[in-house]
Amino acid sequence: MVLEAPRTPLVAAELPRPQPSPGQLLVRVLACGVCRTDLHVVDGELPHPKLPLVVGHQIVGIDEASGRRVGIPWLGWTDGTCRYCTSGRENLCDAARFTGYDLDGGYAEYAVADKRFCFPIPAGYPDAQAAPLLCAGLIGYRSLRMAGDAERLGLYGFGASAHIVAQVARHQGRRVFAFTRAGDEAGQEFARSLGAEWAGAVGDPAPDELDAAIVFAPAGELVPAALRATAKGGVVVCAGIHMSDIPSIPYELLWGERVVRSVANLTRRDGEEFLALAPQVPVRTEVETYPLEQANDALDRLRASRVRGAAVLVVAQA
Ligand SMILES: [Zn+2]
Ligand SMILES: [Zn+2]
């Protein structure tokens, strides 16, 4: 399924099978998660994608050479030499290439990927349930790490990432408060079913102050709302790659050593840590599956915030 130009639907196409270069794996795709970042690329909110492009960066597939199941994440390549790479921050590499953005991704039957950036998939996860671990899970986990040791955690937007983070946070003994759109009773019930002790609309008074908030929804007005709900010394982590403008705020919202920060991409260390942790929690992902040729329908449902858990394209059976 090919993006020919931003703001147009993906088009089904027959492409030649990609040829792996030295150091790359040829992967037969089994499932590929649908991420909000895919939507930002398709909708033209992220500049200069490779075109034409196969989007998708939560790929579970079979390495054709070894027969092993592997995962291909968003971080597809780094130079390994810049000041970010050499200081444990390859997620910030200036020359990084990203799967499904700079490199063809997983809305396809085959993909190639630099083997140094692929992960083994934990046994016990079916392909479709494993796919959302690769971005919703990984970047959610990095965001949770940036929340420090916060005991009272607010999650703004309860989509694919939050539904995983809530489970990890509960496992770590944190208290979880979920904020959704007003009237999203189903989303609030879903959050409570995953261990949130309270779920309500943004702006509703939560029963307690927050020590940290993670903003998953791409709406800038959530940042002041989250700051307002956060105690002194707390942090508001913006987990998305794109967000509408943040409204101006009175300084008193930031005063008291509150911090606002973003989380960008992932490091391979995040992936190794999270994929080791997920089966211990155990994280159970809830997925809506679609055949590959219905990728546009999956994106439409995500755009309308109608997906419960994560949307996943199921491309083939192992
Ligand atoms: Zn670098
Ligand atoms: Zn993603």
Image (spheres, rainbow, N blue to C red):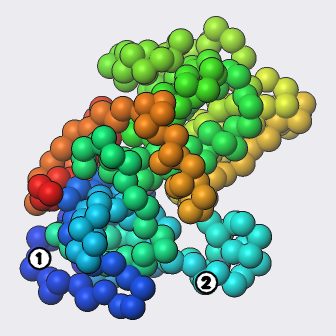
| Badge 2 amino acid | Asp
Label 1 Cα crowd, 10 Å radius (few <14 / some 14-19 / many 20+): few
The picture quadrant for ligand 2 comes to bottom left
Q: Position of residue 6 (x, y in %)?
A: 32, 71
Label 1: which residue?
13
The residue depicted at 30 percent of the width and 33 percent of the height is 286
- Distance, label 2 to label 1, CA atoms, is 32 Å
The residue depicted at 79 percent of the width and 23 percent of the height is 231
| Badge 1 amino acid | Ala
Q: Position of residue 188 (x, y in %)?
A: 41, 18
The residue depicted at 42 percent of the width and 33 percent of the height is 283
In what quadrant of the picture does the N terminus appear? bottom left
**Label 2 C-beta lies within 8 Å of the nearest ligand 1 atom:** yes
Query: Does dot 2 land on a helix, a strand or a loop?
Result: loop
Q: Judge whether 87 appears above or below 33 on screen.
A: below
Give whichever of 259, 196 is nearer the camera.
196
The residue depicted at 57 percent of the width and 15 percent of the height is 204
Label 2: which residue?
79
Which of pointers 2 and 1 indicates the residue nearer the eye? 2
User: Is 271 left or right of 184, judged from the image as shown?
Assistant: right
Q: Is residue 27 visible?
A: no
Q: Judge whether 155 appears above or below 103 on screen.
A: above
Q: Position of residue 191 (x, y in %)?
A: 43, 21
| Callout 2–callout 1 Cβ contact below 8 Å | no
Query: Does dot 1 land on a helix, a strand or a loop?
Result: loop
User: Residue 14: which quarter of the image?
Assistant: bottom left
Question: Tag 1 or tag 2, which sits nearer the N-term?
Answer: 1
User: Which residue, as the protein is rendered here, is positioned at the far front?
Assistant: 66
